[in-house]
Amino acid sequence: MRNSKHTREFRDSAIQLVLNSNEEIKTIAEDLGVNAKTLYNWVYNHKKDNTLQAYQRNTTKISTKESLEEELRRLRKENRLLKQERDILKKATAYFAKETL
C-alpha cells in the first residue's frame, strides 16, 4: 500500500459514512475533501475484503470445536470491532447533524 495523506481512522470513518448514509459517494467525497474516485476505491476494497473474510469464516469446518478460550478471544475481538463501528456511526451522526443546523 502506498503512503497516504489520510489516516486509517479517517478512511474507515469515510467508508462507514458512505455505507451508512443515503448520500451519494460524490457528495460525501466533496464534503470530506477527498477525490470521489479515491473514496469509491476505499469502499470497493472494504467490501471485497469483508466478503473474503466472511467466506473464509463460513468455509471452516463446523465439526471442529473451538476451545472456550478461543471462543472468548474471538468474541472479545468481535465486541471491540462492534464498539468501533458504533463510535464511527456516532461521529457520522454528529457530522450530519452539524450540517443541518
Image (spheres, rainbow, N blue to C red):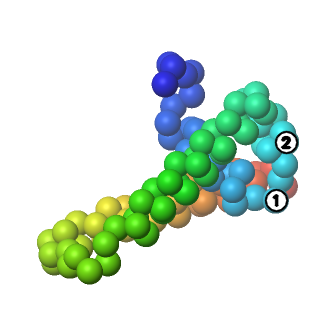
Q: Residues within 10 Å of mark 1 (few under 14, many from 20)?
A: few
Residue drawn at x 63%, y 39% as measured from the top left = 42
Question: What kind of residue is marked 1?
Answer: Asn
Question: What kind of residue is marked 2?
Answer: Thr
Question: In this picture, is 17 found above or below 29?
Answer: below
Question: In this picture, is 20 found above or below 47?
Answer: below
Q: Secondary structure at mark 2?
A: helix
Nearer the observer, 66 or 23: 66
Instruction: Tell me the residue that label 1 is attached to.
Output: 22
Please say whether residue 63 is visible from this viewpoint.
yes
Residue drawn at x 75%, y 58% as measured from the top left = 21
Nearer the observer, 1 or 21: 1
x and y percentages locating residue 100 in the rendered image: 84, 55
Alpha carbon separation for disc pair 2 and 1: 10 Å
Instruction: Tell me the residue that label 2 is attached to.
Output: 27
Residue drawn at x 52%, y 48% as measured from the top left = 49
Q: Which mark is residue 76?
A: none
Q: Secondary structure at mark 1?
A: loop
Q: Say whether disc 2 or disc 1 marks the residue closer to the N-terminus.
A: 1
Residue drawn at x 58%, y 49% as measured from the top left = 48
x and y percentages locating residue 101 in the rendered image: 83, 54
Q: On the rendered structure, is 4 left or right of 81?
A: right
x and y percentages locating residue 15 in the rendered image: 63, 47
Nearer the observer, 60 or 68: 60
x and y percentages locating residue 87 in the rendered image: 52, 59
Please say whether residue 87 is visible from this viewpoint.
no
